[in-house]
Structure formats: C-alpha cells, structure tokens
C-alpha cells in the first residue's frame, strides 16, 4: 500500500512540475530535496516573497511528500500528530484513507473524529480487522438501528474503538445506551474511555424516561466520583451541571464536592456549578485561588470569570508586581496578565506586564510571548524566533504565533530539516494558524 501511495505521489509531482509551474521552494518540498528547499526558502525570504500564503503552500507540499513515506504504527502516530491541520489537509487525508494499512486507517479516524467528514463516512469499515478503520467505522454507529453493534463495540479489544463507540452513543443520545455506558465508566481499564463514557451519559440524560431515572443516574455518577482520577471527576462534574441532571441531584452532588476540598476535583466542581448559575461555585473558586498551592491556583485562574467583580479583583492583584520583601509569584502574575488581556480596561496593563516578562529565560517568558502574539503585539517576535530552536512542542506554538503576527517566513528554519517529525509539525502549525 505504501508503494501505491508513492506512485500516486510521483504522478502528482510530475504533473505539478510540468503543468502548474510551482515556486522553487514548493518544487523542492515535493521532491524532498532539503538542501534545495533551504536555499530556495532563504532566497525567497531575502527577496521579501516568502509570505504566509507561500509558507502554507510549501508546508502542504512537505506534508504531501512525507505522508507517502509513513508506514506502520509509527506512521499512524505521525498522522495523529496532524490533528491541528486536518481541515486544510482534507483532500490529502481522504486520498490517504483510500488505502488499507495502519496509516490509511489513522487518516480515516482523524477525518471522522474531527468532523472533517460525516461521522458515517467510513461506516463500511465497521468490521475491519484494522483497529483504526474499525474505530472510524464504529464512530458512525449512530441511531437506533445500530444500537446492538454500538453497545458491543463498547467492549472491543482496542481502546480507540471503545472511545469511538462511546462517542457514537453520545451522538445517539438514547436511554438504551445508559446501562452499557455506566459499565464502561465503572470498569474500562483506560481513563480516556471512562471519561468519554461519562460525557456520553450526559448527552443521553435528557432522553432518560423520568426524573426518578435521571436521579438514579446522578447517584451512579456520584459513586464513580469516589476514588477516581481528576480527569474522570471533571467529566462527572460537567455531567452533574448539565440541564438534565442539575435539578435531579446534580446540584446537590456539586455542592457536596465543594465541601470535600479535593484539589483539582473541587476546582472542576466549583467551575461547573458557577457555569450553571451557582454563586457558591464562584465563591469557592475565590477561596481556592487564595489558599491553594501553585498548581491548583493556576487551575483556578484559568476558570475565573473576569466579568465578576470579585474575580477581576483577584486577577488584577495577582498581576501586580510583588510588594517589597514579598515572594513574587511570577507564574500567577503571568497567567493573570494573560486572562486580563480580554478585559478592555485592563488590557494595556496586562500587555505592559507581559512585555516585561519577555526577557525571562524560562517558560514564563515564552508564555508571555505567546499571549502577546494573540493580541498582535510584534514585540513578541524575537522571543518567538528564539523559541523555534527549543526541541519541544513549544517550537510549534511559537511557529503558529509568528504566523499570526505576519512573520511566517521565520518558520522556514523548521522546514529545511531532514527530521520529518519536525518539519511536518511545523508545516501543520503554519497551516492551522489563524491569520491576521
């Protein structure tokens, strides 16, 4: 199958070179010629011709070239890494999904999971021995006529298939799925599958036959809260806050969770209650922001509502420089400034704070630059260019931010490398980045 994809790619390259007269950089990208690509990119940048559109064209050509060389489980993992740019890659991923190997299955799953195509686009693959294809097919098992197979797939050997089955159940929103989903939420060995099952239960709740039955569902979810991880508890909290469950015990359980002071789980419960209109949740968030350790405090800050005067006051105080002799909580100050960029009256102070953090050598300086890019402040550019050299996911966030600022040409240093993972991730960041 990989040979077939290579043949198709070769035909595409010939057609492009002969009939489409692409730029030199695009030609070199389609051929995988890294030295030629570097030279042409540098020449275009020097001539002022390497704008965002050109970088997107080159990025698309790079991924098209490289995708033909993906194979096996590693190739499937590389397809998974294209999540952010799946929409601009739609046609390429659809061609890839026409194959029958792990890479093709991963492309099909990606298209369905992100709703780039209809959820039933690969329904004919529902019984495929390839787990990736089977997951893509299972995702389309929506509605009453697929109920039996959908419930059976909740217990498939592959975790991706089980997640697809829970998501299909969520779309089906049927009380017939409730018992099966509860079994998965209790017993599945994979945390992601359990959390997905709880989310599906929240979707099914409005279709449960009576208030008594919905109350029983709340009780079942309450039992799941005890002893489980924060990720599952977060999903349970949001289920409790859903309109169908809040008035039949969900509010009671959220209020009970607030009294237990369980760190991140309490934060999620407070946020869910606040989102459902509960002032108690907002008050608990304030308390946790003042009394918790750094990790929980930062979690709280991300969930505060700056439109609430008391929350706004917390954030403005956190953003202010530390008083003489006091410990400077720079992480909280950075995050508070990021949050206050959304508040017109505080925006200029937040920008000043973030600009002052750009010289920091740690990740907080990088976070400040990324936040400034969100509001179009070009003073972030030098730090973002520096972060392109950091061997972590940060470099791709920096690439996206540079595109947003209009400096996409800076990202060319990540294109001109033999490392497929680096150049494809950079290209994906450019393709996915908001422009302007």
Image (cartoon, grey):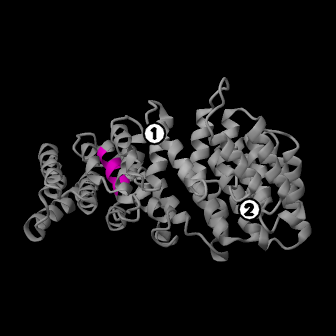
SS label for mark 2 = helix
Q: Mark on residue 201?
A: 2
Residue placed farthest to the left in the image?
18
Q: Please determine whether, in this image, residue 85 is positioned above or below residue 389.
A: below
Provide residue 317's location: percent of width, then percent of height: 68, 42
Question: Mark 2 and mark 1: span between their CA atoms?
Answer: 39 Å
Q: Considering the image in quadrants, where does the N terminus appear?
A: bottom left
Magenta residues, dominant SS class: helix
When asked about the image quadrant of residue 200, the answer is bottom right
Drawn side of residue 135 relative to residue 251, left or right: left
Provide residue 389's location: percent of width, then percent of height: 33, 36
Which residue lies at the image location 14% right of the left edge and 64% below the top edge? 22
Drawn side of residue 109 relative to residue 29, left or right: right
Which residue lies at the image location 39% right of the left edge and 58% below the top edge? 433
When asked about the image quadrant of residue 47, the answer is bottom left
* First to last magenta residue range: 423-430
**Magenta residue check for 126:** no
**Magenta residue check for 424:** yes
Residue placed farthest to the front in the image?
324
């Amino acid at each position: 199958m990989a040979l077939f994809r290579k043949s198709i790619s070769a035909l595409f390259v010939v057609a492009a070179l002969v009939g489409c007269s692409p730029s030199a950089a695009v030609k070199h990208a389609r051929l995988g010629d890294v030295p030629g690509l570097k030279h042409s990119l540098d020449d275009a940048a020097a001539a002022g011709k390497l704008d965002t559109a050109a970088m997107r064209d080159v990025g698309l050509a790079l991924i098209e070239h490289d995708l033909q060389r993906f194979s096996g489980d590693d190739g499937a993992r590389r397809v998974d890494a294209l999540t952010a740019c799946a929409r601009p890659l739609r046609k390429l991923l659809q061609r890839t999904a026409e194959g029958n190997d792990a890479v093709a299955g991963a492309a099909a799953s990606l298209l369905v999971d992100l709703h780039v195509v209809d959820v039933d686009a690969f329904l004919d693959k529902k019984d495929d021995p390839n787990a990736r294809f089977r997951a893509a097919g299972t995702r389309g098992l929506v509605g009453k006529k697929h109920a039996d197979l959908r419930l059976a797939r909740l217990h498939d050997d592959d975790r991706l298939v089980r997640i697809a089955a829970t998501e299909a159940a969520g779309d089906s929103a049927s009380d017939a799925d409730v018992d099966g989903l509860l079994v998965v939420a209790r017993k599945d060995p994979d945390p992601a599958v359990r959390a997905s099952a709880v989310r599906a239960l929240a979707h099914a709740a409005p279709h449960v036959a009576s208030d008594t039955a919905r109350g029983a569902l709340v009780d079942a979810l309450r039992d799941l809260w005890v002893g489980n991880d924060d990720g599952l508890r977060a999903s349970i909290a949001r289920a409790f806050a859903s309109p169908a469950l809040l008035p039949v015990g969900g509010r009671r359980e959220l209020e009970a969770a607030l009294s237990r002071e369980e760190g991140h789980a309490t934060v999620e419960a407070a946020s869910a209650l606040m989102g459902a209109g509960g002032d108690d949740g907002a008050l608990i968030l304030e308390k946790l922001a003042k009394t918790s350790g750094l990790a929980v405090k930062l979690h709280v800050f991300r969930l505060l509502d700056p439109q609430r005067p008391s929350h706004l006051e917390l954030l403005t105080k956190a953003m202010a420089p530390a008083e003489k002799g006091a410990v400077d909580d720079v992480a909280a100050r950075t995050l508070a400034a990021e949050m206050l960029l959304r508040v017109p009256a505080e925006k200029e102070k937040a920008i000043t704070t973030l600009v002052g953090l750009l010289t920091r050598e740690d990740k907080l300086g990088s976070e400040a630059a990324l936040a400034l890019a969100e509001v179009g402040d070009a003073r972030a550019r030098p730090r973002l260019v520096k972060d392109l050299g950091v061997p972590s996911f940060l470099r791709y966030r920096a690439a996206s931010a540079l595109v947003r600022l209009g400096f996409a040409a800076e990202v060319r240093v990540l294109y001109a490398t033999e490392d497929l993972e680096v150049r494809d991730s950079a290209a994906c960041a450019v393709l996915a980045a908001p422009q302007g």
